[in-house]
Image (spheres, rainbow, N blue to C red):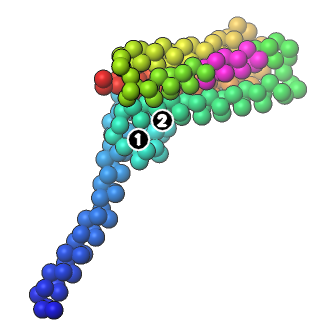
């Protein structure tokens, strides 16, 4: 083989391998940028990016996938909140009134989770839906109802000031985190292109 041809072959192989190895990074950056841009005007932008950026490769640049992932992270957050409330409800230092409020709160979070699951079902059906606006409207309704239930949990604690402040703060932190994730999911649903 001629030296010139050998050099050309080497350079072609080197450049093509270099381009193909940089493509995944370029794609990943594109996907990360999509998530960051989508979250930039969300109700809680920092929480949105923190929750959704790890899923950029899954989401790619697909707004429906982004909403589905946002709702799925809401379910994860609701599960964590439910675990916290359930654990606190079993402590021996709580009063009967606190136990009743925590029991109501567990019910509120379970209702919220059911509503988020209904919202996921609506969003997942959009690609095949004959009426995409109706599916989005249903998802908005379910997600709004979930946020209302999350806030109902907090409302139960505001009736009395005698609640154990440590328990109250732990539940409040957990519910506030959940409500932020839910609000961001609702924002993304509201901004789905149809």
Identify residue for label 1.
Answer: 59
Apparent side of residue 104 relative to residue 58 in the rendered image (left or right):
right
- Residue 9 placed where, x, y %? 18, 80
In this picture, which residue range is highlighted in magenta?
Answer: 102-113
Q: Which label's residue is closer to the chain start, 1 or 2?
A: 1
Between residue 82 and residue 95, name the one nearer to us: 82
- Residue 185 placed where, x, y %? 46, 26
Identify residue for label 2.
Answer: 69
Q: Residue 107 falls in which quadrant of the image?
A: top right
- Judged from the image, the secondary structure of the residue bearing numbered disc 1 is helix
Q: Please report the residue visible at 15 percent of the width from the left and 81 percent of the height from the top.
A: 8
Residue 48 circle label = none
Apparent side of residue 139 relative to residue 34 in the rendered image (left or right):
right
Q: Circles 1 and 2: CB distance less than 8 Å?
A: yes
Residue 69 seen by the camera? yes
Q: Please report the residue visible at 62 percent of the width from the left and 28 percent of the height from the top.
A: 78
Which residue is farthest right? 92
């Amino acid at each position: 083989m001629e030296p010139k041809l050998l050099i050309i072959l080497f350079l072609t192989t080197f450049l093509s391998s270099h381009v193909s190895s940089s493509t995944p990074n370029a794609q990943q950056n594109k996907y990360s940028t999509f998530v960051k841009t989508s979250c930039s005007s969300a109700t809680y932008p920092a929480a949105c990016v923190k929750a959704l950026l790890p899923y950029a490769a899954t989401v790619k640049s697909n707004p429906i996938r982004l909403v589905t992932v946002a709702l799925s992270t809401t379910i994860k957050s609701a599960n964590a909140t439910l675990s916290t409330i359930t654990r606190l409800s079993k402590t021996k230092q709580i009063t009967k009134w606190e136990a009743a409020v925590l029991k109501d709160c567990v019910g509120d979070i379970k209702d919220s989770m059911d509503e988020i699951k209904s919202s996921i079902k609506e969003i997942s059906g959009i690609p095949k839906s004959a009426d995409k606006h109706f599916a989005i409207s249903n998802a908005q309704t379910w997600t709004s109802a979930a946020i209302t239930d999350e806030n109902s949990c907090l409302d139960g604690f505001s009736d009395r000031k005698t609640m154990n402040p440590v328990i109250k703060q732990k539940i409040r932190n957990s519910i506030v985190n959940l409500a932020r994730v839910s609000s961001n999911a609702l924002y993304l649903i509201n901004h789905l292109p149809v």
